[in-house]
Image (tube, grey):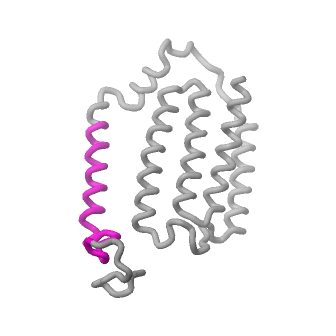
Amino acid sequence: MTDGIFWALAVVAVVAAVWVFRFDSMARATYALLTSLLCTGGVVVLLGLDYLGVVIVLMMTVEMALMAVFMVMFMMNPAGLMPMTMVHNTRGAAVICTALFAVLAAAVLLVPWPERRGRPPADATEQLGLSLMGPQMLTMMTLGMALFAAIVGTVVLATRRGRYDRYGDDLSAARAADPVRGGVG
């Protein structure tokens, strides 16, 4: 059963990762990337690293949701109404990816992996948390909130006007009174 779930998550993760580069829409590409990362988090949970898997799922969900919101607000073509490509130099990228895959696959098969010494800890999740954060968990949580506030503050300060400012209070106006020339209204 576990093997079947593992392979299903692995296949969906790879397919969704390919979709990231096939979609014309940045928003769709963001959610395809989220799907791939959620499946990766599921694989990590199946490997016995529950804490790390849940952290991956939570972080990637929030990150991709924020990314989708910012893309819809600020990208020229968030819905994919005009064809666009997310890939450049496709032949070069294919050659590099194929070579890298071959090198990594050969390394996995040819490297003499070390034997396990000792026994695994009684609570692997606690050990992982202590290894990642140590006694600095409160510091890291505070730093995360400070970084989020800085990101929001930067976006607010960087834009003098919002997406719908040119319409004023009447969003149903037939023609926008855009004070800045060159917009789409």
| Relative to 141, 23 lies left or right | right
The answer to whether residue 101 is left or right of residue 181 is right
- Is-magenta flag for residue 155? yes
Q: How many marks?
A: 0
**Quarter of the image with the N terminus in it:** top right
Q: Is residue 183 magenta?
A: no
Relative to residue 26, is residue 179 depicted above or below? below
Residue lying furthest bottom:
181
**Residue at point 61% right, 70% down?**
85
In terms of depth relative to the viewer, which is nearer, 130 or 51?
51
Q: Is 47 situated above or below 8?
A: above
Of 128 and 68, which appears nearest the observer?
68
Q: Position of residue 25 (x, y in %)?
A: 56, 64
Point out the image quarter for the C terminus.
bottom left
Q: Nearer the viewer, residue 123 or 5?
A: 5
Left/right placement of residue 80 relative to residue 96 reads left
Place of residue 43 in the rendered image (x, y in percent of width and height, measured from the top left): 61, 33
Residue 164 figure quarter: bottom left
With 93 as the anchor, is 35 left or right in this view? Answer: left
Identified at 57% across, 71% down, the residue is 81
At horizontal 61% and vertical 57% (from top left) the residue drawn is: 20
Image: magenta residue range: 140-169
Question: Magenta residues: mostly which secondary structure?
Answer: helix
- Does 122 appear above or below 184? above
Q: Position of residue 58 (x, y in %)?
A: 45, 38
Residue 98 placement (x, y as % from top left): 73, 56
- The residue positioned 47% from the left and 73% from the top of the image is 76
